[in-house]
Amino acid sequence: MDRIGGRVRTVPFGDGVVEVGAEWIHGIRNSSTYRTAMQHNITIIPQDPTFKVYRSDGTETDDELLLNDLVNFCFVMVGQKHINFVGGLGEFITRRLLLYVKAKYPYLIKDTGFLPEFVGLMNAYISVHEASNDWNEVNALSEYEDLKGHQHMSWHRYGYKTLFELMLNTYNNGSGLPNLDIKLNTEVTQIIWPEDGADVRVICADGSTYTSRHVIVTVSLGVLKDRYTTLFKPGLPWKKIEAIEKTSIGAVDKIIFKFDKAWWRGQETYYGFMWKAEDKIKLPIEDYWMTKVFGASRPRGSSNTLSLWTSGEMGKLLEQMPEDILKRKCMELLRKFMGKCYDIPEPTGMIRSTWHSNPFTRGSYSYDNRLTTQNANDRRFLAEPLVDTHGVPRVLFAGEATDSHHFSTVHGAVDSGYREAMRLMNNRVF
Ligand SMILES: Cc1cc2nc3c(=O)[nH]c(=O)nc-3n(C[C@H](O)[C@H](O)[C@H](O)COP(=O)(O)OP(=O)(O)OC[C@H]3O[C@@H](n4cnc5c(N)ncnc54)[C@H](O)[C@@H]3O)c2cc1C
């Protein structure tokens, strides 16, 4: 692309910055990203994922303690290992949630409205967290492992881009890395890797060619799905092709608005949107996507912006919607839920992400789908290098989807790069 960072994209917006892609450091113990920030005295601050919930009739829920307790319970369930449960993540969480509610809030069981509405909100929220279309597309037995520590650490006004400035030694007017030569706007179209041990050749769309003993490929799983048939010559081994086909990458998208000044109150991170069944039914079919926007968040890097979040097929739909319609409909949605409590002005700007339609990302991040249990080694196969006839790794693979336990994150992506660098070092190829 015309910039570095890939799925990390910090943009100046409002009175600070917003994150169009990755927003938080998830966990701090053994986190390469957190460690990098600490080594350079960058303050990273926790941003608790607290909710204030509004209903589709414009009322706000009054028991915030209860709601946040339930949200927190669901979120904790996502991170648990469910060894004896075969099925979707949503089924697992719903079952556990019912037991929890029965024990702690028994009066809620009789409330036929609240629980289905809350479960609908959690489906939309956790689907965004997982990048899935629905929370039951995600395997309850995911291999993902949380790093210990706060799960929502924010780069706030520094922006996630600071990670790259630190890595490239350009932070605070640093002099950069003299031996590093990054070619922007240079699309790789083919990687020719002679099996007999001759140099690997990288062919680019602008006609340029680079030769090297080794190549590390870090394109997203979405780009691999799109291009693996033409990108590699000779083609990829069957095991890797199967892993590319069977592992899932989903879309998570944000629509970020800026306003003259903040019109919302309170310190919550999220304003959740809880649909009443009767309001859902009344929606025209072309507006059904609105039920999959779980709410809005307050970006930590600016004080007068709000991000709406969605995922899956609805995210892909919103990526394609004409800007003026998208803006009008999103403002309708905000006013439907929050308009009775606030006088909501027109926004002064909008940014929408296009992670699925971008040919250089083709998705937001990978998740463990329902087939994962049968194909437990797929991420290992994704990470396996292409070796020549002497057994030397020539084309290596990194990127978030290749990390078996920390996929879908920036720290997983960074670690996977070190993993492949170490593979070359350990093979004593230098
Ligand atoms: C909306 C969203 C929210 C997220 N939130 C978080 C979060 O809060 N915390 C977190 O840890 N993670 C989050 N993530 C995930 C995180 O951003 C990714 O896991 C991580 O950035 C992936 O890094 P990568 O190096 O594997 O791939 P990428 O960042 O996709 O890098 C791949 C690079 O390959 C380049 N490329 C692709 N095709 C070609 C080609 N043909 N020729 C040349 N170059 C090519 C791309 O331009 C890109 O620079 C989020 C992602 C999104 C989209």
Image (cartoon, rainbow, N blue to C red):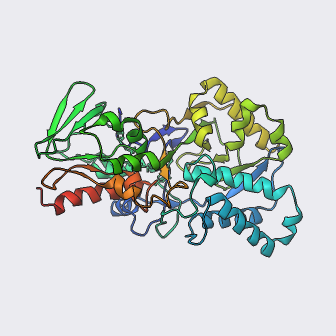
On the rendered structure, is 166 left or right of 28?
Answer: left
Q: Nearer the viewer, residue 197 or 347?
A: 197
Q: Is residue 425 left or right of residue 279?
A: left
Where is residue 180 drawn, in percent x and y? 20, 44
Rendering coords of residue 109 (x, y %) = 85, 66
* Residue at the limit of the structure toward the bottom, as seen here: 103
Residue found at x 25% / y 30%: 204
Picture mark count: 0
Q: Quadrant location of residue 69?
A: bottom right
Q: Residue 14: tell me if it is visible.
A: yes
Quadrant assignment for the N terminus: top left
Residue 85 occupies quadrant? bottom right
Residue 360 lies left or right of residue 47; in this view the side is left
* Quadrant showing the C terminus: bottom left
Which residue appears at 57% of the width and 53% of the height? 129
Examine the rendered structure and indicate whether residue 347 appears above or below residue 87: above
Query: Residue 393: x and y, percent?
Result: 19, 53
Looking at the image, which is closer to me, 265 or 37? 37
User: Where does ligand 1 appear, by image quarter?
Assistant: top left
The residue lying at 39 percent from left, 56 percent from top is 379
Is residue 22 in view?
A: no
Answer with the quarter of the image where residue 319 lies.
top right
Please provide percent x and percent y for residue 314.
Answer: 63, 38
Q: Residue at x 30, y 52 (%)?
A: 167
